[in-house]
């Protein structure tokens, strides 16, 4: 099994036995270079479930963007970076963006300040095309439907992907009153309610399932995972992750393309 044979089982300590594992998707479960979930990751997650450790998704994506990962073992879902939380098939938390903030964003889009991907519960649409949006489609292997930004005035919007460079976040924040940002890529910034975030969604799941922080481990690779790392007892960053995620994590595992999830689960003593 290659590198999977070389890791030391149980060489990473946890505060207490682990009952749940939270997983980011892009760059963590999903290899962006291969545009698929590595077989070793699927196997690791399946074995976690068999061992009584519940896999839980914690992602900026939502269900209609998750066709490339195996979700069969997952018992709960934190999507839209924490704005929609489902446990056991029930929606236990729904936190869309403020309607007045959405109206301000639509106005900014129509003024040409930036392009935006609006993400509703059952659909998403892109306000327009520029180099940043094209590069995002290439990076994530997705193709986004073009739509009228004013559609966002008609339904709940849970998340925005605003195509701004690092340092330009103020263009969104200055136009809104109840919005905050996090970033996974230099191509765009995620806009969400100021009370939201993966950390909030993870806390809700832990409360619903009666989990203590020290009984949970979280895996991630980006800036939007850092707050999540802060609310669990053990956190694991991917070697391919950003410097902020790696410095915030308890441990750093191997690259997503080098059996990073499998190796971490073995080192943590969660699978054999």
Image (cartoon, rainbow, N blue to C red):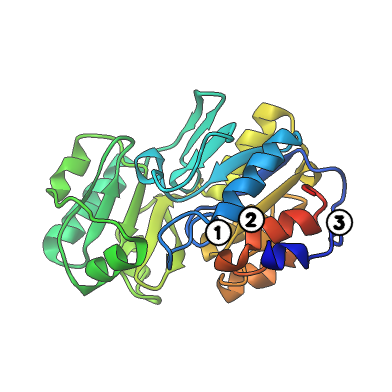
* Residue 219, numbered label: 2
Instruction: Tell me if residue 163 can be seen.
Output: no
Disc nearer the start of the sequence (3/1): 3
Q: Position of residue 159 (x, y in %)?
A: 36, 48
Left or right of residue 139, residue 15 in this image: right
> In whole angstroms, how far apart are the C-alphas of marks 1 and 2?
7 Å
Give residue 29's quadrant in the image. bottom right
Q: Position of residue 269 (x, y in %)?
A: 83, 51
- Mark 3 highlights which residue? 10
For image coordinates 85% across by 43% down, the residue present is: 17
Question: Is 71 displayed left or right of 269 in the figure?
Answer: left
Answer with the quarter of the image where residue 32 lies.
bottom left
Compared across the picture, whether 264 is left or right of 174 comes to right
* Residue at image mark 1: 28
Percent position of residue 78, x then y: 52, 40
Mark 3, other Cα within 10 Å: few <14 / some 14–19 / many ≥20: some
User: Residue at left 55%, top 49%?
Assistant: 198
Element type at mark 2: strand
Disc 1 residue crowd, few under 14, some 14–19, many 20+, Cα 10 Å: many
Element carrying mark 1: loop
Nearest to viewer (mark 2 / mark 3): 3
């Amino acid at each position: 099994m290659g590198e999977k044979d070389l890791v030391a089982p149980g060489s990473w300590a946890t505060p207490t036995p682990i009952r749940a594992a939270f997983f980011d998707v892009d760059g963590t479960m999903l290899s962006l270079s291969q545009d698929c979930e590595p077989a070793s990751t699927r196997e690791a997650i399946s074995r976690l479930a068999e061992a009584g450790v519940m896999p839980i998704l914690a992602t900026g994506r939502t269900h209609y963007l998750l066709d490339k990962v195996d979700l069969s073992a997952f018992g709960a879902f934190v999507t839209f970076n924490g704005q929609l939380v489902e446990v056991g098939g029930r929606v236990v938390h729904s936190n869309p963006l403020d309607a007045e903030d959405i109206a301000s964003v639509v106005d900014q889009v129509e003024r040409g300040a930036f392009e935006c991907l609006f993400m509703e519960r059952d659909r998403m649409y892109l306000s327009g095309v520029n180099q940043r949006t094209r590069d995002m489609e290439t990076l994530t292997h997705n193709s986004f439907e073009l739509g009228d930004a004013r559609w966002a005035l008609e339904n709940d919007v849970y998340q925005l992907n605003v195509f701004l460079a690092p340092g330009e976040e103020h263009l969104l924040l200055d136009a809104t009153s109840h919005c905050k940002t996090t970033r996974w890529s230099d191509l765009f910034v995620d806009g969400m309610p100021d009370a939201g975030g993966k950390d909030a969604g993870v806390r809700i799941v832990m409360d619903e399932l009666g989990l203590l922080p020290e009984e949970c481990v979280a895996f991630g690779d980006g800036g939007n995972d850092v707050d999540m790392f802060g609310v669990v007892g053990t956190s694991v960053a991917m070697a391919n992750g950003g410097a902020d995620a790696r410095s915030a994590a308890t441990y750093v595992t191997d690259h997503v393309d080098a059996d990073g999830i499998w190796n971490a689960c073995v080192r943590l003593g969660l699978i054999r």
